Amino acid sequence: MSILLDRKTRILVQGITTTEGRQHTAKMLECKSEVVAGVSPGKYGQEVMGVPVYDKVSEAVKKHKIDVSVIFVPKNAVLSAATDAINEGIPLIVIVTENIPITDTIKIKDQAAKKGVMIIGPGSSGILVPKISKVGDMSTEYVLPGMAGVITRSKGKEKQICQSLFKEEIGESTIVSLGGDKIIGTGYIEILKLFEKDESTQVVVIGGEPEGRLEEDAARYIKSSGYSKPVIAYIFDREKNPQIAEEKEKMLEDADVTVVDDIWEIGQIINESTIEE
């Protein structure tokens, strides 16, 4: 099992003819992801590595069943692209583009909430289920199939956690990059809930950051819900705001989360816990 993606998940790439869209569509296909269509205005009838291209999302959904849309368009076009996908009822939208205007992100979140659509991003590396499927531009280096669910924020942070796990020969069930923008769609809590229900996930690793309140929300949720799976947390870039980072670490520890100062401890702790069990 996994969360959010499986072998049959059908993917739409918005901005597929952009340089980034082409590059990462190729990498998604290499991961055996089921990329069924792409959208780029004015490019109707073209193909990108065998994937048919449409002018509009509405045209693509008439021809294909779509489960996820991933957005690789310039930041000034993200609101329009996301709105099109939301209006067509695509249940999961991953926004890879970074530094979206805050007002645009708020509009996207409001529209998505009304339609029951999950937004990952903006500024997300995407979602990866090792050896199964990938959406976005997340690296597959240092990734193995396994038992650890990984949740991070800014792009690239997930790779550092995976390196710690890889060193100890521990794999991941699913890796989710929430996005590094100031305002994002989905937070830790929603993904924690999914991991708790996922039989293949035995431990959850959170890669937090000093900015924002998402880690504090996660700590409150873990404590109040009596979260059933072990959680390990590491705060990246704590030197940017040591006081806030320390406050977050204390809140997580109070929620029985194992907080590490050294990222390389993550894999070691999981292995030691497994051996003890």
Image: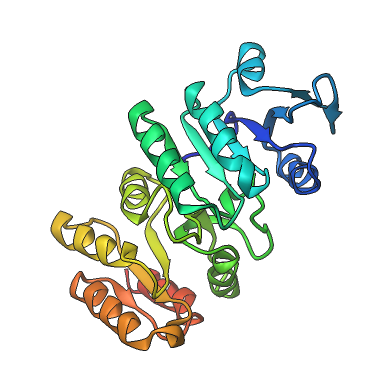
Q: Is residue 232 above or below residue 70?
A: below
In the picture, the quarter occupied by the C terminus is: bottom left
Q: Is 15 situated left or right of 48 in this image?
A: left
Counting from the top left corner in percent of width and height, residue 191 is at: 37, 49
Q: Which residue is drawn at 51% across and 31% down?
A: 83
Residue 67 image point, x, y percent: 54, 28
Q: Is residue 232 something one can see in this rendering? A: yes
Residue, far left: 224
In this view, the residue in front, 121 or 191, is: 121
Picture coordinates of residue 175, whole percent (x, y):
51, 54
Q: Which colour scheme is used?
A: rainbow
Q: Is residue 132 visible?
A: no
Compared with 197, 181 (above or below) is: below
Count of numbered circles in the view: 0
Picture residue at 21% right of the left edge, 57% below the top? 221
- In the foreground, 172 or 233: 233
Q: Residue at x 64, y 30 (%)?
A: 12
Residue 54: name its quadrant: top right
Q: Is residue 74 left or right of residue 247?
A: right
Q: Quadrant of residue 155?
A: bottom right
Residue 239 in the image: above or below residue 88: below
- 266 vs 241, nearest the viewer: 241
- Image location of residue 164, percent across then percent down: 55, 74
